[in-house]
Image (spheres, grey):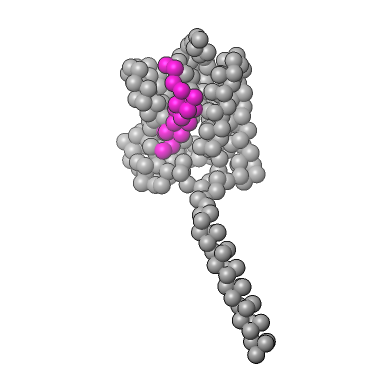
């Protein structure tokens, strides 16, 4: 059976560069908040812009990473890092706008990662995983370089969760024969709705749940209640 995805990228290149630029701006803003020097600002901006794509391309092992071959990637990241460094206050004032754009771009990163995985005939799980990695890898590297527990593994708003749902949805639609353009559009829309719903309604990922511990505590409490009831009846008889 022929591969349902016969081109490496179907999304407009300008849309991908928009995602790279806003990713770099977000990273530069994070770095300036941390009080990093210009090298630090550029480094964090760079990993936010292309970190997920670099991880994806290294895992795919299909050649040189795209960000190192196409100069526009690094040029866009460098430009955004300079903007974030020199106009930090103005960038902070634009955070609401950046949040909206970032919400709209989650699905773009997912599609970019999953499409490249499907081109080389990765499995369902592999394609979905690389879609998530492309969308979240930059933030993971940012947090590690800044000495923080990565936001991707902390309870909080839906970002990784939105990427996971969108990646699974995209691969399922491709395997079901949905035209690529429709699958891309629906995936981007679904990721944006999940992310915006999390921000609007306060949806948060839960902490780890200790089912065995809760069962043990419940059984202990019931046994203690039964023992006390038995003692009370015994005292009444006496």
From this view, report whether residue 229 is shown above or below residue 117: below
Prevailing secondary structure of the magenta residues: helix
Instruction: State the quadrant of the C terminus.
Output: bottom right
The one nearer the camera, 68 or 150, is 150
Name the residue located 58 percent from the left edge and 31 percent from the top edge: 191
Q: Position of residue 118 (x, y in %)?
A: 47, 18
Instruction: State whether residue 71 appears in this view.
Output: no
Q: Position of residue 213 (x, y in %)?
A: 51, 59
The one nearer the camera, 228 or 210, is 228
Q: Residue furthest bottom?
A: 238
On whether residue 183 falls in the magenta region, the answer is no
The one nearer the camera, 32 or 54, is 54
Name the residue located 32 percent from the left edge and 18 percent from the top edge: 64
Name the residue located 63 percent from the left edge and 84 percent from the top edge: 234
Instruction: State whether residue 91 appears in this view.
Output: yes
44 relative position to 234: left or right: left
On whether residue 122 falls in the magenta region, the answer is yes
The image quadrant that residue 187 belongs to is top right
Name the residue located 40 percent from the left edge and 22 percent from the top edge: 73
Q: Position of residue 35 (x, y in %)?
A: 37, 45
The one nearer the camera, 69 or 64, is 64
Q: Position of residue 172 (x, y in %)?
A: 57, 23
Q: Give the number of marks.
A: 0
Instruction: Give, as a single range, the part of the protein colored magenta.
Output: 120-140
Q: Residue furthest front?
A: 237
């Amino acid at each position: 059976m022929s591969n349902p995805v016969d081109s490496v990228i179907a999304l407009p290149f300008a849309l991908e560069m928009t995602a790279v630029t806003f990713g770099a701006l977000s990273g530069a803003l994070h770095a300036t908040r941390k009080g990093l020097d210009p090298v630090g600002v550029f480094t964090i901006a760079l990993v936010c812009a292309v970190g997920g794509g670099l991880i994806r391309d290294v895992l795919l092992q299909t050649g040189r990473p795209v960000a190192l071959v196409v100069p526009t990637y690094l040029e866009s990241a460098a430009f955004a890092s300079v903007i974030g460094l020199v106009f930090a206050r103005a960038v902070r004032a634009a955070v609401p706008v950046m949040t909206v754009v970032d919400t709209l771009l989650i699905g773009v990163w997912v599609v970019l990662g999953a499409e490249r995985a499907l081109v080389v005939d990765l499995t369902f799980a592999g394609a979905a995983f690389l879609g998530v990695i492309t969308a979240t890898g930059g933030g993971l590297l940012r947090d590690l370089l800044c000495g923080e527990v990565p936001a991707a593994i902390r309870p909080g708003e839906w970002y990784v969760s939105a990427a996971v749902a969108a990646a699974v949805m995209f691969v399922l639609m491709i395997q079901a024969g949905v035209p690529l353009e429709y699958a891309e559009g629906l995936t981007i829309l679904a990721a944006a709705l999940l992310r915006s719903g999390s921000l609007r309604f306060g949806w948060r990922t839960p902490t780890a749940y200790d089912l065995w511990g809760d069962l043990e505590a419940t059984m202990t409490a019931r046994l203690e209640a039964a023992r006390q009831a038995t003692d009370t009846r015994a005292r009444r008889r006496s």
